[in-house]
Amino acid sequence: MKPNKKPIIFLLGPTASGKTDWAIDWHNQFEAIEIISVDSVMVYKECNVGSAKPSDATLEKYPHHLVNHVSLDSIFSVADFYVAAMELINNIHSREKIPLMVGGSMMYFNLLKTGISKLPPADRQLREKLEEKILTNGVEALHADLKKLDADAADNIKPQDSQRIIRAIEIITSTGISLDGNLASLPTSQLKDKYNLIEFGIFPSDRSKLHERIESRQGALVGDKLLEEITQIQNAFKISAEHPAMKAINYRQGLQVLEGKLEKSELFEKSLYATRQFAKRQCTWMRGWENLTFFDLHQGEEATEQLKKHLNLLQTV
């Protein structure tokens, strides 16, 4: 621990690894801890079933910042997360508390740790115009427009990825510079330079154990309640399949069932496969993470003892 630097705890882990249970246990054991969710789907108020969001009773007893934070009539971008998370960190520290960042959205964690350029906010008017163009001319036409504005950006974005194409055009139109220019303006100051980062990861030594956990809970995430939830969302917001929440695992497959593109009988297996692949990608992120202390699925007590040592040391400096 370095003196005069306030702590931030990171708890990373693949889906179904038990992150929420560990966070709640730490909340109980360490009075100063406040939980901040690092999850790109739980942030939406209406995404409950398919996101494996904690119950209302759990959230009432153990508040999670950035859960139920926005409605689906908006898109909560990585930049939005960064701004909201930094505001929360400063607020929590101002009250002499300790932020515990917990979740599985590895890109969110990475950008939080390494910093993010001051990208412009989403331009609703421009976004609507671009979405209308997709409906009229197809997403490939919009990708061609991006190629004229920034060939390098277009080469790095798939022609069918409407969300990233729209965001790229928004940034270039608003700033007048390429995405490379925006990336080059990332602040050199990182969280590790300003704070004491305590970085823990739940990493399964036996992947089959994680697969068992994923499969045991999958049925509750993709049954009739999920289809009812998606139907309610579609009726309330009229959002497209390109909305980030509708592209998330479980929601994407559920929407395909409702659109007749996937048999209901296939929903469980398709979403289970996608979840396992997602967990594999999360683990790949974690393997390359610098200064991450790894704990196996069953090592919650060991992690808690290690955290106690970190926090006790912090009190002595």
Image (cartoon, rainbow, N blue to C red):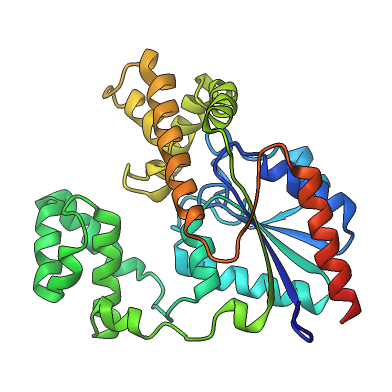
* In this picture, residue 113 sits left or right of residue 187: right
- When the figure is inspected, residue 135 is found, relative to residue 168, above or below; the finding is above
Q: Nearer the viewer, residue 170 or 238?
A: 170
User: Residue 22: percent from the left, percent from the top?
Assistant: 74, 45
**Residue 282, visible in the rendered structure:** yes
Q: Residue furthest top?
A: 265
Looking at the picture, how far across and down is residue 193, in whole percent?
61, 83
Quadrant including the C terminus: bottom right
The image position of residue 170, as x and y in percent, is 28, 72
Asked if one can make out residue 96 in the rendered structure from this viewpoint, the answer is no
Position of 4 relative to 283 (above/below): below
Tell me: residue 111, above or below residue 22: below
- Tell me if 88 is positioned left or right of 167 in this view: right
Percent x, y for residue 123? Answer: 35, 71
Q: Quadrant of residue 261?
A: top left
Q: Does 196 sit left or right of 32 as displayed?
A: left
Please tell me in which quadrant of the rendered image residue 36 appears. bottom right
Number of numbered discs overlaid on the protein picture: 0
Which residue lies most toward the front here? 205
Q: Relative to 125, is 58 above or below?
A: above
**Quarter of the figure with the N terminus:** bottom right
Which residue shows up at 23% across the image and 70% down it?
A: 169
Seen in the image, is 239 located left or right of residue 43? Answer: left
Q: Residue at x 38, y 16 (%)?
A: 264
- Identify which residue, 133 or 153, lies in the foreground: 153
